[in-house]
Amino acid sequence: MKKVSIVTVNFNHSHVTDALLDSIAEKNSYANIEIIVVDNASAINPVPAWLVKYPQVKFIRSEVNTGFAGGNNIGINAASGDFLFLVNNDTEFTEGLIETLIETLEANPKIAMISPKIHYYDVPNMLQYVGYTEMNYFTARNSQLGQLETDNGQYQHLTGKTGFAHGAAMMVTRAAIDKVGLMAENFFLYYEELDWCARMKHAGYEIWVNMDALIYHKESISVGKQSAIKEYFMNRNRILFERRNASNFQFFVFSIYFVVLVTPRNSINYIKHKQYGFIKWLLKSIWWNITNSVNSNKLGYPLK
């Protein structure tokens, strides 16, 4: 039986992580697992209380907030599994989740990464994710399939290759990580899993989704539905993703598209909703990409 390392990252919401750990204990039936929780410099250190409550779990405390990619990379480096199941701490398991994903991975060695179908936790029969379309590198746009639809089984046929895995729940093979490397930590938040998938596809692997596996997602608990940090990193990393993965011609066209259409449109929306401060962070996201290399670890955002 292959070993699975379940890795999750916590930041200031230990009660949410508690619910995930409880759901794993209740719903998971796959025996050969290890669970690793990385606390990403939460204001109040939850690890001492966790060690008492969950003695079977491995906890790692980072004194610096390393972001989504950095936190997961810490967990990956500490893991010993043949498969690594990276899940957001605001997810909850369902029965047979791990077994179903492993069965697909073992049947096709070309697969580097696979995600389950994702439902919204608050509306249990509403879809969040059943796959992504491929990226249009001229606009850095793609579509998340099934989002906000009631799940009537209409996407069951989509089990197979997809554009990208979903960062809330993705099982990765150790072999693919050894070949491609870890997630790029300079994304910090957003787009890192898309970049990782793009690199794995470039290395000859496939990205899959399995409609027979299901996880529930509580969505955007740590950052919120809309915030300055979200707007900054979404814009900054959209550009960074293009710089790292698009061809020179594709990036040239994208740059014109972003400056001529996206920037004015977003600015008008910010003004319309009286979110004037967001304009500053949009411009800073562009300036960061002008003044930093694709491997720069300077975030450009004053995180506390």
Image: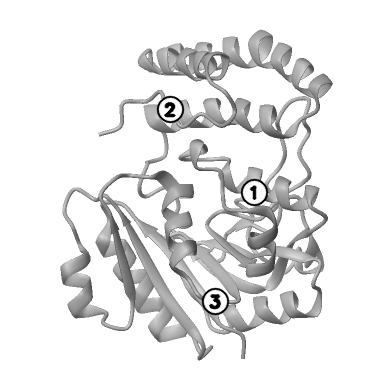
- Lower position in the chain sequence, tag 2 or tag 3: 3
Rounded to the nearest angstrom, the CA distance separating label 3 from label 1 is: 19 Å
Q: Circle 3 sits on which residue?
A: 81
Rounded to the nearest angstrom, the CA distance separating label 1 from label 2 is 20 Å
Residues under numbered marks 3 and 1 in contact, where contact means CB atoms less than 8 Å apart: no
Lateral position of residue 240 relative to residue 48, left or right: right
Q: Is residue 102 left or right of residue 155?
A: left
Kind of residue at disc 3: Gly
- 129 to the left or right of 60: right
Q: Residue at x 31, y 62 (%)?
A: 16
Q: Which residue type carries mark 2?
A: Lys
In which quadrant of the rendered image does the N terminus lie?
A: bottom right
Where does residue 88 sit, x and y in percent of width and height?
45, 59
Q: Amino acid at mark 1?
A: Trp
Mark before the other along the chain sequence, 1 or 2 = 1
Q: Name the residue carrying label 1.
A: 196
Write down the quadrant of residue 143 in the picture: top right
* Residue at image point 77% right, 46% down: 133
The x and y percentages for residue 282 are: 48, 17
Secondary structure, mark 1, is helix
Above or below — where is 77 with respect to 257? below
Observer-nearest of 204 and 214: 204
